[in-house]
Amino acid sequence: MPNAEKIKKVEELNGIFLKAKSAVLANYQGIEAAELTQLRSHMRGRAIDFRVVKNTLAKQAAKNTPFELLDGDFTGPVSLVLSFEDAVAPAKALAEYAKSGAAKNPKVICGVVEGKKVSSEEVKALADLPTKEVLISQLLSTMNGPTTNLVGALSGLLRKLVGTLDAIKDKKAKE
């Protein structure tokens, strides 16, 4: 029989699942308490929510949310790494933490990004993507290229026309 505290935790987690854009499920087994504190601090500094959750409560909280896809993956000691703004932020933050030289890193199990389940390999691929700002910059420079080339070609034609008209003017002035 569920008690009031568990019901409250399920409701809180459900609210978090409804607000989150993405989540990564990671196994934290073997990580010492001090390292787990470091990991939490690392995530907090990037506006990412890191939670160790009870599997049964997480399964109940995930019902009727995009994170219901994780239902079968809530096994063993798992933590949730959630982002409310940037969909790839949890993957990037976990990768950064792994590169920081921590003795033991959480093992990525899977994730949900904007309503779609992704495997651990896909989470790692997301971590390797450039930031949103860099991608927008690359897109804009790609879009700007053809217009710059068109302006250059048109100005070249205009220069030739002016040069030809100048030559005709000089020829007529000599005659």
Image (tube, rainbow, N blue to C red):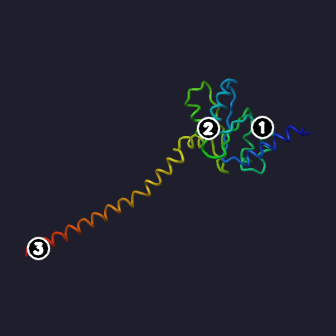
Is 140 situated left or right of 102 in this image?
Answer: left
Disc 2 versus disc 3: distance between alpha carbons?
73 Å
Q: Quadrant of residue 28?
A: top right
Do the residues bearing badges 2 and 3 touch, measured as CB atoms within 8 Å? no
Q: Secondary structure at mark 3?
A: helix
Query: Closer to the camera: disc 1 or disc 3?
Result: 3
Quarter of the image with the C terminus is: bottom left
| Residue in front for this viewpoint, 157 or 170 | 170
Q: Secondary structure at mark 1?
A: helix
Amino acid type shown at disc 2: Arg
- Identify the residue under disc 3: 173
- Identify the residue under disc 1: 55
Up-down relation of residue 91 to residue 175 (above or below) = above
Q: What is the crowding at mark 1: few (fewer than 14 residues within 10 Å), some, or many (at least 20)?
A: some
| Residue at figure coordinates x 60%, y 24% from the top left | 103
Amino acid type shown at disc 3: Ala
Quarter of the image with the N terminus is: top right
Disc 1 versus disc 3: distance between alpha carbons?
93 Å
Query: Closer to the camera: disc 2 or disc 1?
Result: 2
- Extreme-front residue of the structure: 173
Residue 30: x and y, percent? 68, 25
The label shown at residue 46 is 2
Q: Secondary structure at mark 2?
A: loop
Amino acid type shown at disc 1: Asn
Residue 89: x and y, percent? 60, 42
Disc 2 versus disc 1: distance between alpha carbons?
25 Å
Residue 5: x and y, percent? 86, 37
Q: What is the crowding at mark 2: few (fewer than 14 residues within 10 Å), some, or many (at least 20)?
A: few
